[in-house]
Each structure stands twice: as structure tokens, then as C-alpha cells.
Amino acid sequence: MTEEKLEVICDACRRPIEDGDGFLYVELAKVRDLWSAQPDPDAQVLSIESLMGRPVRPTWQARHTACAPDDGGASYDVPVAQVRTWPGLAATTARLMGKSWLQHTDWDALLEGAASAGGSRVSRTSLREAS
């Protein structure tokens, strides 16, 4: 039986990340900034200024441990080994769906990239024997 292996590419050095050597992460401060900038649901009209000043949707990044900035523990990390296979990526996604902030990140774009083999962070690669 074969299982498709997913490749995770470091955003800093653009090299593949091996299991145990890196992670995917999202900066939780950016998620909080986006939450605090949500428009008033009772507002009738939004100004151009309020729309232009909204924070950008937080992006999941892939980094080797050696390439990662020191964020003082302010990020949510997912080890690469947890997303190496489709079952692993699905299980990680199911776990993340329990986080109230996931919908405010680009995890959906990460999944779409992996599924289309065109992902810049997680992408389809080769088949390997399942152990």
C-alpha cells in the first residue's frame, strides 16, 4: 500500500522541511488584532477608512526551526510531522477546527494549495510505502 507524502517548504529559505526540523505557525497577536478590528454589526454603513485600516488575515507560515524568528512563544505551532500525510493533515485540521480563531486565518488556502499540488507551504510530492 502506498501513501502520498506531503512536502512542507520553508518560507524563509525555500527548502523542504524534514520531520522534527520545523513547523507551521500562525501569529496569535495578528489573530487578536483582526478580532478587535471587526466592524460594529449594528453599523448601517462602513467608511472607506475603516475598511482600508482593517488588519490583513493572518497567514500560516512554514519554517525550519533554525529559520524561525523568536516570537517569545506568541504563535500557535504545528510540527511538520503532523501534516506530512493526508490523514495527518486531516487530523490536524479537525483539531484546529475546535479553535475559535481558525476561521480568521488562511488555513483554508493552505489546504487548497496542498490539494492542488501548487501550494507554496504544503504541497503534494511523491508516493511512499506506508509503514
Image (cartoon, grey):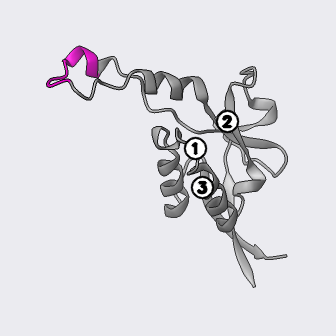
Q: Does the residue at mark 1 contact the one at mark 2 (Cβ under 8 Å)?
A: yes
Under mark 3, the amino acid is: Thr
Nearest to N terminus: mark 2 or mark 3: 2
Q: Which residue is mark 2?
A: 76
Tally of numbered discs: 3
Q: Residue at x 24, y 14 (%)?
A: 49
Under mark 1, the amino acid is: Lys
Q: Residue at x 60, y 55 (%)?
A: 93
Q: Does the residue at mark 2 contact the one at mark 3 (Cβ under 8 Å)?
A: no
- Could you tell whether 123 is left or right of 13 in the image? left
Mark nearer the viewer, 1 or 2:
1
Q: Which residues are magenta?
A: 43-51
- Could you tell whether 49 is left or right of 62 in the image? left
- Could you tell whether 30 is left or right of 9 in the image? left
Q: Which residue is mark 1?
A: 99
Q: Which residue is mark 3?
A: 93
Q: Secondary structure at mark 1?
A: loop
Under mark 2, the amino acid is: Tyr
Task: Please determine whether, in this image, residue 74 is positioned above or below residue 22.
Answer: above
Whole-percent x and y of residue 87?
67, 67
Q: Residue at x 63, y 37 (%)?
A: 11
